[in-house]
Image: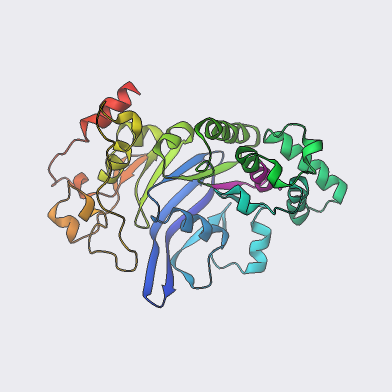
Amino acid sequence: MDKVLELKDLSLSFYTKQGEIEAVRGVNLSLNKGEILAIVGESGCGKTVMSKAVLKLLPKNSKIKTGSIIIDGEDITDYSENKMRSIRGGVVSMVFQDAMTTLNPTIPVGKQIAEAVLKHNKVNSEEAKKRALEMMDLVGIDDSMHRYYMQPHYFSGGMRQRCVLAIALASNPKVLFADEPTTALDVTVQAKILDLLLEIREKTGISIVFITHDFGVVARIADRVAVMYAGKIVEIGTAEDVFYDPRHPYTWGLMLCLPYLAKEGQPLESIAGMPPVMINIPKGDAFAIRNKYALEIDYEEQPPMFEISATHSAATWLLDERAPKIQPPVSIKRGLKNG
């Protein structure tokens, strides 16, 4: 398949008065044309930082230490701010989770969409308005001509998210980053937004990186899944690989937190502890201290990425041929089989 985005050994740090924060560590990742790739993990694991690195939306105290960012075959790692202005929106767009802070509260939403068209296309204002109305129709905003002139506060949370999505799609980008776009929405609106993303992918062929901490959302939308912890990809595979044959203990922990896997009358499962402070990453596997299946080597050496199949890999010493054979918690298998 054609790759529209590649991250090769990408490492990124923030430099603060307290020291170096290693936010992204040696990430290798690719996105295929027309694919939805979900990046899943707890808050603070580096998902959003990694995506903002692609668009160069990080503060000045950040630096890419190693690796490269390739979009549609072009290495943009060292692109200047001027060059990135043609990339953002025109080639890669991003939708953030809080639509109200993304939209300008004083400007009608239609004009904000039209502005995005004008930024990246050689069109006049009438043509930009026509494109904006088309985008509003595409994302399911009814009565677009009337709503074109309405400010964001007239829209519900779900409708505002559709407006932000219309802005992101206005210049027909090849890649869309969706950073937890359904987090602040109720479950029925959330489902509609997910269905909308699937519909837009079908109509436009756009490739989507969907960032979330919710494995239930992942199951609904993703073609492939990458599990991220402490700035590293710890497991990656097709949705079927990761859901039906999870191999990393962190993936097991995230899946056990799903409400539908809870036993009747029992509290929800949780992963003990918190992700490490990235200013002082522990030696060995960063997940070891929270991992009840950890081996002695986990506290000494970082595990390599073990290949399970042509589409599935995981970074855990449990996959080493010398490791004891430990099966995933039975509740995961039972829940998935019956889910």
Q: Is residue 203 left or right of residue 280?
A: right
Q: Position of residue 93 (x, y in %)?
A: 61, 51
The residue shown at (81%, 54%) is: 122
- In the displayed orientation, state which residue is furthest to the top: 338
The residue shown at (53%, 51%) is: 5
The residue shown at (47%, 48%) is: 30
Instruction: Please say if 41 is above or below 84.
Output: above
Q: Nearer the viewer, residue 68 or 226?
A: 226
Q: Is residue 73 magenta?
A: no
Q: Is residue 174 magenta?
A: yes
The residue stretch that appears in magenta: 163-178
- In the displayed orientation, state which residue is furthest to the bottom: 17
The residue shown at (24%, 48%) is: 272
Instruction: Please say if 165 is above or below 119.
Output: above
Q: Position of residue 13 (x, y in %)?
A: 42, 68
Q: Quadrant of residue 200?
A: top right
Q: Is residue 337 left or right of residue 5?
A: left
Instruction: Please say if 138 is above or below 232.
Output: above
Residue 154 visible here: yes
Q: Quadrant of residue 269?
A: top left
Q: Position of residue 139 (x, y in %)?
A: 67, 36
